[in-house]
Image: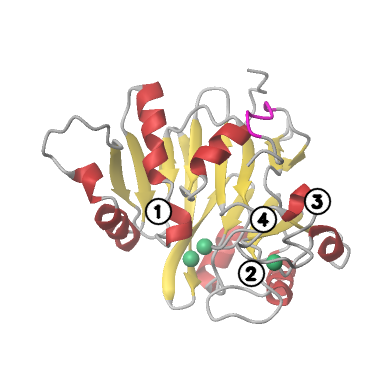
């Protein structure tokens, strides 16, 4: 495949739990012709030429794998265990098969307990003729850095309403979805960022997500070189909303990529990976 060797990060989905378009909605965003207004559920793929790491396993993981050419998953990082972040886990079977390996899945103990309960068949020791996901649950302890397939990942403890969850920092890239509070202790881990991807659910305040205005304020405080907002509802029409944002900020969209440059910094990138076998018109 026509990959670059350098590390690249692909936003697989940038939509809220319902996805955009929403079922049964004919609003201007849900009927938009702009492919950036079509948002699958939130997930990220981090790759270089020898390995791949997923953040979350959203329900469209198979479609995202086809569309964005996901060819390796050597580890999974779970932000939390809400349905829109874990329900694609069964699709990891394909990577078990391709790689002939069990996939370590990292997360907080409470999130891993939900994964174990939801996908209990994957942990059933009874021999079976069906092909189950082969995953190993690995608990993340606080903000202690972890080794995910050889990639150093710093967990960033944040809050999703009252629920403690995790964001992740990899080099100059940080991904903080499903949050409306970044505690002071985690702010230090967000200094000198090249790219910040941050939750901005909708226009009005919400009990467990940042609104766009709140997210802009927090992003200004953090001061990353580039900030992109994710986990978006249909309230945001891409082009119209982008035009209202400060210069260093934008709305994320499915397929947005960041590449690690020769200077060791992540920056938004033109696509270098294959377009995949399902295009934006094809779902
Ligand atoms: Zn979510
Ligand atoms: Zn709509
Ligand atoms: Zn959530």
Main SS class of the magenta portion in the image? loop
Residue under the image location 68 percent in, 42 percent down: 255
Q: Which mark is residue 166?
A: none
Q: Which residue is mark 4?
A: 196
Q: How many marks?
A: 4
For ligand 2, the image quadrant comes to: bottom right
Quick one: quadrant of the N terminus?
Answer: top right
Quick one: quadrant of the C terminus?
Answer: top right
Residue under the image location 67 percent in, 75 percent down: 211
- Whole-Å distance between the Cαs marked 4 and 1? 20 Å
The x and y percentages for residue 119 are 28, 50
Residue under the image location 56 percent in, 54 percent down: 41
Q: Is residue 9 shown above or below 202?
A: above
Compare residues 82 and 196 and report the one nearer the observer: 82
Side (left or right) of 222 relative to 242: left
Q: Which mark is residue 201?
A: 2
- Whole-Å distance between the Cαs marked 2 and 1? 28 Å
Q: Which residue is mark 1?
A: 144
What kind of element bears circle 2?
loop
Q: Which stretch is magenta?
A: 273-278
Q: Nearer the viewer, mark 4 or mark 1?
A: 4
Q: Nearer the viewer, mark 2 or mark 1?
A: 2
- Whole-Å distance between the Cαs marked 4 and 2? 16 Å
- Whole-Å distance between the Cαs marked 3 and 2? 19 Å
Q: Which residue is mark 3?
A: 34
Compare residues 189 and 121 and report the one nearer the observer: 121
Mark 4 residue crowding within 10 angstroms, few (<14) / some (14–19) / many (20+): many
């Amino acid at each position: 495949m026509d990959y670059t060797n350098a590390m690249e990060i692909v936003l697989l989905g940038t939509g809220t739990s319902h996805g955009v378009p929403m079922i049964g909605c004919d609003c201007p965003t849900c009927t938009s012709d702009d492919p950036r207004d079509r948002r699958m559920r939130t997930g990220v793929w981090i790759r270089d030429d020898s390995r791949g790491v997923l953040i979350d396993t959203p329900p469209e993981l198979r479609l995202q794998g086809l569309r964005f050419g996901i060819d390796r998953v050597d580890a999974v990082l779970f932000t939390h265990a809400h349905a829109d972040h874990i329900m694609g886990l069964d699709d990891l079977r394909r990577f078990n098969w391709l790689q002939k390996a069990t996939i370590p899945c990292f997360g907080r103990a409470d999130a891993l307990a939900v994964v174990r309960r939801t996908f209990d068949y994957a942990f059933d020791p009874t021999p079976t003729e069906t092909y189950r996901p082969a995953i190993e649950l690995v608990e993340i302890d606080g903000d202690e850095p972890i080794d995910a397939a050889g990639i150093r990942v710093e967990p960033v403890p944040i809050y999703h309403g009252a629920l403690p969850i995790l964001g992740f920092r990899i080099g100059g890239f940080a991904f903080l979805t499903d949050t409306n509070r970044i505690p002071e202790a985690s702010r230090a881990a967000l200094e000198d960022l090249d790219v910040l991807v941050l939750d901005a659910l909708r226009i009005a305040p919400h009990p467990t997500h940042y609104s766009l205005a709140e997210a802009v304020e927090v992003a200004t405080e953090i001061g990353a070189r580039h900030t992109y907002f994710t986990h978006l509802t249909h309230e945001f029409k891409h082009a119209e909303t982008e035009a209202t944002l400060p210069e260093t900020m934008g709305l994320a969209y499915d397929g947005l990529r960041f590449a690690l440059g020769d200077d060791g910094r992540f920056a938004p990138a033109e696509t270098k990976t294959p377009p995949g076998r399902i295009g934006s018109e094809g779902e």
